[in-house]
């Protein structure tokens, strides 16, 4: 890009910190304002913005006339959203209809919505999709500008996918900005052309972290790594006492005898082994205020 591009940012500080830092470093970009999520503690970041003389806002409703008037006055070329939690309505999008973009850590149109990285692991996906798309009035339904895939292995868990998203997203956003500014006739992909329905992931709530031991070892393994730290960790109960499980290991050639799902079938060097629907799974990182014994049962209550 040979021109200075004026950017308005709608940002989750948790998700967008590295993106903000990368955009600030770029000599061809000028950040005109940052709109922060209202549900995050951003006092330290706000102090940084003040030092850099970058205007910032926290609005409960970005679709009000008052806010629309404010951001119009910044004269932005492009508006970028990353991890922001409000829906952009028609009145806001009309400021610059072809210049509102969003970076989404999911393979659209199949991973729209919330807690996408968790669902990606739960569904045993072999790749993580990060998508930059135009914003419309739907939820992650706008035309795709670009989409890159990154492999997922059994060594990945929630934290590694978070870090991959933080690392890879800034370059995708910069690439999309360059495409918009330098290629008037760029080709975009309509999500309906990929699939007419796609898939929406709902937000995970309290209680969704409880393990179903009637699932296969592979399914339980995926579930536990999907909500491992810094997530809430998967939860079960031994004699009514809570146990939180952070990490498991698939046991090679584990026996497939019939048994009671959730029963502890042995204590191992690194933890203990639990019967699942089809075999057994080793628990290697957990939090429990008590002693785990062979024969104990892990239950959902």
Image (spheres, rainbow, N blue to C red):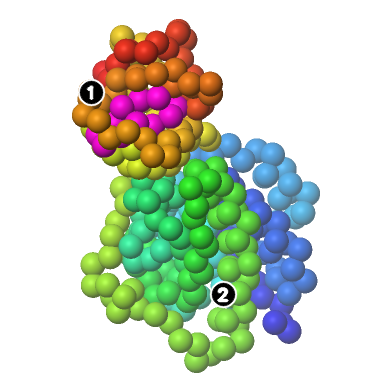
Instruction: Quote the CA–CA distance across marks 1 and 2.
Output: 52 Å
Task: Give the percent coordinates (x, y) of residue 64.
Answer: 42, 57
In the rendered image, which residue does mark 1 sit on? 260
- 290 in the magenta segment: no
Q: Could you say which quadrant of the image residue 243 lies in?
A: top left
Q: Secondary structure at mark 1?
A: loop
Please tell me which residue lies in front, 81 or 292: 292
| Disc on res. 44 | none
Would residue 248 be seen by someone viewing this image from the given angle?
yes
Above-or-below relation of 291 to 131: above
Which mark is first along the chain, 2 or 1? 2
Please tell me which residue lies in front, 236 or 153: 153
Circle 2 packing at 10 Å, graded few (<14), some (14-19), many (20+), is many
* Residue in view at x 31 percent, y 27 percent: 275
Task: Give the percent coordinates (x, y) of residue 155.
Answer: 53, 46
Would residue 232 be seen by someone viewing this image from the given angle?
no
* Residue in view at x 30 percent, y 79 percent: 193
Range drawn in magenta: 273-283
Nearer the observer, disc 1 or disc 2? 1
Task: Give the percent coordinates (x, y) of residue 150.
Answer: 52, 62
Circle 1 packing at 10 Å, graded few (<14), some (14-19), many (20+), is some
In the rendered image, which residue does mark 2 sit on? 176
């Amino acid at each position: 890009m040979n021109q200075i591009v004026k950017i308005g940012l709608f940002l989750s500080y948790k998700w967008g910190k590295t993106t903000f830092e990368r955009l600030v470093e770029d000599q061809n970009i000028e950040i005109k304002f940052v709109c922060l999520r209202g549900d995050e503690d951003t006092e330290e970041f706000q102090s940084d913005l003040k030092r850099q003389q970058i205007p910032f806002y926290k609005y409960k409703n970005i679709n009000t006339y008052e806010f629309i008037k404010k951001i119009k006055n910044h004269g932005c070329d492009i508006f970028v959203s990353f991890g922001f939690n409000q829906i952009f309505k028609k009145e806001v999008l009309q400021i610059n209809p072809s210049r509102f973009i969003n970076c989404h850590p999911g393979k659209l149109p199949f991973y729209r919505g919330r807690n996408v990285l968790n669902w990606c692991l739960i569904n045993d996906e072999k790749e993580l999709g990060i998508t930059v798309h135009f914003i419309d009035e739907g939820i992650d339904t706008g035309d795709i500008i670009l989409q890159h895939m990154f492999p997922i292995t059994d060594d990945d868990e929630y934290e590694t996918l978070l870090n991959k998203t933080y690392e890879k997203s800034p370059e995708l956003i910069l690439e999309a900005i360059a495409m918009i500014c330098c290629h008037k006739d760029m080709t975009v992909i309509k999500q309906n052309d990929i699939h007419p329905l796609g898939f929406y992931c709902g937000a995970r709530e309290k209680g969704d972290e409880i393990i179903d031991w009637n699932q296969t070892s592979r399914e339980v393994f995926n579930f536990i790594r999907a909500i491992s730290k810094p997530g809430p960790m998967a939860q079960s109960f031994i004699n009514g006492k809570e146990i939180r499980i952070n990490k498991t290991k698939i046991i090679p050639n584990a026996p497939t005898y019939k048994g009671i799902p959730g029963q502890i079938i042995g204590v191992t060097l690194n933890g203990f082994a639990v019967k699942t629907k089809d075999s057994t799974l080793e628990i290697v990182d957990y939090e429990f205020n008590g002693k785990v014994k062979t024969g104990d049962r892990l239950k959902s209550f």
